[in-house]
Image (cartoon, grey):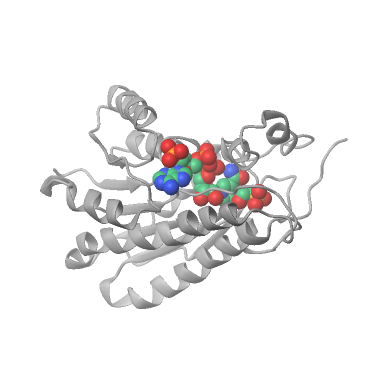
Amino acid sequence: MTQKIVFITGATSGFGEACAHKFAANHYNIILNGRREEKLRTVQSSIEQQYGVQCYGLPFDVQDRKSVFEAVATLPEAWQQIDVLINNAGLALGRDLFDEASLDDWDTMIDTNVKGLLYVSKAVLPYMIPHKKGHIINLGSTAAKEVYERGNVYCATKSAVEAISKAMRIDLLAHQIKVTAIHPGAAETEFSIVRFKGDENAAKKTYEGYEPLTAEDVAEVIFYTTTLPKHVCINDLVLTATQQANSVYFNKKS
Ligand code: NDP
Ligand code: 8X3
């Protein structure tokens, strides 16, 4: 296989799905992950039909350490030379004050956004290191940059993603692996529907009064970071809607 390979976690929706389209349109073969197998197959066949590239569906839960390592180990040899890993799978659960938030929500966010990212990276790196090339892209957030009210543990997980990205960049220097942390502001995907546990009205309110980012905007920027010469690495990149300055300040029309 001569085409490049990108491995995208959380490719059944939002940024991950948009990245799958963007990279496929640019002739990458795609390894797609997510828990919803049916959705994964739908994304897979849509991409194969539209772009004529190959996809490999690898459904697993990034929180489950054993499943991550077992699934990644099953990749056929032709799929092992991974050029780009996008650690995108992640979620927020709840927007509650610290003293009122659910411990289960906290566990799930930490297990997915932090531990899942660590497991997948550790499982994929043995496919990159021998080739002395590779690019790991980690999805942080503006929530990594400023903590906001009722964001407590979600913000903490994204700060952890920022710190882990810095640490990876140092420890993987010898292997010439690029590490990029991408920090989007508010983008309208399934993110808020998940955060508000299916409450579509609450989710919709998150994006009222301004034009948020789209998944495609974010995929465009992620793809751009992979197009630079071998000696150039974007380390840390924040992108927001023009009507958003940071985690807290928006120019909303009432
Ligand atoms: P979506 O909810 O649209 O997509 C999240 C994806 O992650 C889905 O494909 C979901 O698939 C997958 N996922 C969630 N949990 C797991 C798991 N345990 N194992 C495997 N896959 C999982 O959200 P976004 O696309 O908006 O978010 C993508 C990333 O970007 C997240 O890390 C989020 O924190 C971050 N982000 C989002 C912003 C936003 O405003 N939307 C802004 C900044 C960062 P499935 O359910 O099938 O497993
Ligand atoms: C997602 C954006 O502002 O809800 O990371 O934290 S925000």
Quick one: 148 or 208, which is closer to the camera?
A: 148
Residue at the location (39% across, 28% down)? 39
Residue 240 shows in the view: no
Q: Is residue 96 rendered to the left or right of residue 190?
A: right
**Residue 160 in picture, x, y percent from top left:** 53, 67
Q: Residue furthest left?
A: 77
Quick one: 104 or 223, which is closer to the camera?
A: 104
Residue 141 shows in the view: yes
Quick one: 123 or 176, which is closer to the camera?
A: 123
**Residue 131 in picture, x, y percent from top left:** 18, 64
**Residue 22 in picture, x, y percent from top left:** 40, 37
Residue at the location (39% across, 63% down)? 118
Residue at the location (30% across, 24% down)? 45
**Residue 202 in picture, x, y percent from top left:** 72, 35
Q: How many marks?
A: 0
Residue 159 picture quarter: bottom right
Residue at the location (76% across, 55% down)? 248
Residue 100 picture quarter: bottom right
- Quarter containing the N terminus: top left
Q: Is residue 18 above or below residue 126?
A: above
Quick one: 229 or 148, which is closer to the camera?
A: 148
Q: Residue furthest right?
A: 254
- Quarter containing the C terminus: top right
